[in-house]
Amino acid sequence: MAGANASRPPRRLVLPEAVIRAAPRIGWALMSVGLFAGIWELLWLCGVTDPKLLPPPHIFLGNFPEQAKFFNTAQRWQIGVGLNTGPSAGMALVITVLASAARVFAGLLIASVLSISIGVAVRYFLVVEKLALPTITLLSPVSPIAWLPVAIFVFGIGNAPAIFMVVVALFFHMVLATVSQIDGVNRNLINVARTMGASKWQIYSRVIVPAILPGLLMVLRLNMFGAWMVVLVAESTGVGYGLGQVIMLARNTFNPSLVFFTIALIGVLGFCSDWLMRLLQRKILYWMPETTGVLRGL
Amino acid sequence: MVSKPFKPISSQDAVVCRNVSKVWAEGTKRAHVALRDVDLDVTPGEFIVLLGPSGCGKSTLLYLIAGLERESGGEVWSFGDRVAGPSPERSLIFQETSLFPWLTVGQNASFGLSIRGESAGARRTAAREVLARVGLTEAIDKRPDELSGGMRQRVAVARALAMRPKVLLMDEPFAALDVQTRAKMQDFLLDVWRDSGASVLFVTHHIDEAVALADRIVVFTSRPRPRDPFSPEAELLRRQLTELMRDEVDRAFAEQEAVAATA
């Protein structure tokens, strides 16, 4: 690697290397979406789909300001407030997106800290295992939707129940995943530390926790999509700004365009947060070799 | 048979095993005897190869000596102390790479010192010193996955050496390497061993490797010792031993005659 850098000729290209390397991937992503959108547009052109019920992308994405003004969900129902007061349409959209994303990430953060701590404690202290694991296993198959009433009973309406929903959706699975990751740690690594006189605490902090991080981040990444799904349900109960609110509004006002617009937005957000997570993964797990695509040659 | 006339356990012996046995999953349906009545004496600085087919219990014995597992019967001693748990004096090196992938080579080599809470400077110095002994000074800031299999095992040896062990336990450390690398690693190990003065217990199922390395080879067999002195097995054993003994006996006689002639 070092040799390749040293022998590189002086820069001639304007584009940074990262962009050039990512270009084919971005190209394929656009192609993939384009294909899907193209089929949809074609169906509309041929008159197979009703544009009122299944408006094609150029319709629901076309009138951006029209769509964006619905995102002002926090104040539009207040008495004496007109459609045009409050933040501008674009601003409202930004606030809505940020509010939903903040809930997702707050939930992810709380869930991962809680579940990793409890998962490690389950293996560290036998009492914790005996007392906590049966309940956690019992509760883990419960759908997060079932927790919605609980969230409202306990936290009322607002940010707290939405974050609670995200936490509850991830927590149980992640505890079980942490425990199984710990059980999967290479015994040799633990035995090396033992022969070197490491205490139990040292074995956990210096060997087990670093060894389970790759698996846990993978679990976190997979669960992040689940978090995006749950936050919408939680937000539909009323949280001020939130994508769930917009979907609810679209449903109540029978506005398919707004539904599809929001769906597209959530798709983009999910994609971006997955990319962020991959970035984080690479930063924290600097020692992991890149394994994506190893099966491509088969 | 009379009870075996053992010499007493002294603090001079690097490892002493007396009647050691190990039953895995003891008391369950899957109970399985891995070792039965093993006696073994290892003197300081001795290179012993434990030779036997897979699953004969040689690794089990290594784990017992390392203190990673408790014996089901008998006693394991090391330098006058009963082995009750793992100790930095007895380092174990595994067949597969057991380096910590998130640490650099240098951090791996000085891992044991960091467990003891030594300063970063002391760790770095020690890492450089042991890596020099295995010929990997250059690799100190690399990550394990940037090294070849043979280099990784050398780092594992360096990591063990950093603890200044009196006994090096090696569980088929070169099994995953190709033939050429393995031959080189054997030479390398002999150098390191002479250097360190530690006793080595080396497990392998390769006869060539055993012959190339050992002062003494201990063969593991799963067949029981023949109890009937008139059985064909006992007869065969007697004949094999006689063959082995004949040369030694002849030499001893010749020496005695020479001594008698000069007197």
Image (tube, coloured by chain):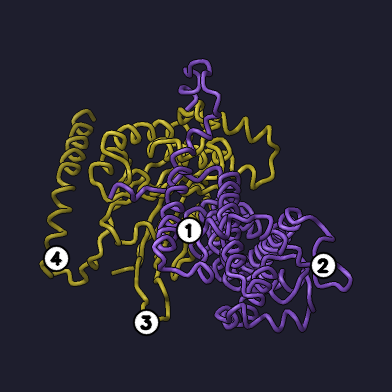
Chain colours: A purple, B yellow
Q: Chain of mark 2?
A: A
Which of the 4 image quarters holds residue A77? bottom right
Disc 4 crowd rating (10 Å Cα; few below 14, some 14-19, many 20+) is some
Whole-angstrom CA distance, mark 4 to mark 1, is 40 Å
Q: Secondary structure at mark 3?
A: loop
Which of the 4 image quarters holds residue A42? bottom left
Q: Secondary structure at mark 1?
A: helix
Which residue position is annotated with label 4?
B233
The three-letter amino acid code for the residue at tag 3 is Lys
The three-letter amino acid code for the residue at tag 1 is Arg
Q: Chain of mark 1?
A: A
Q: Earlier in the sequence, mark 4 or mark 3?
A: 3
Disc 3 crowd rating (10 Å Cα; few below 14, some 14-19, many 20+) is few
| Label drawn at residue B29 | 3
Q: Chain of mark 4?
A: B
Quick check: marks 2 and 3 in contact, CB under 8 Å?
Answer: no
Compared with A225, B48 (above or below) is above
Which of the 4 image quarters holds residue A228? bottom right
Quick check: marks 4 and 2 in contact, CB under 8 Å?
Answer: no
Observer able to see residue A181 = yes
Residue located at (46% from left, 31% from top)? B134
Which residue position is annotated with label 1?
A187
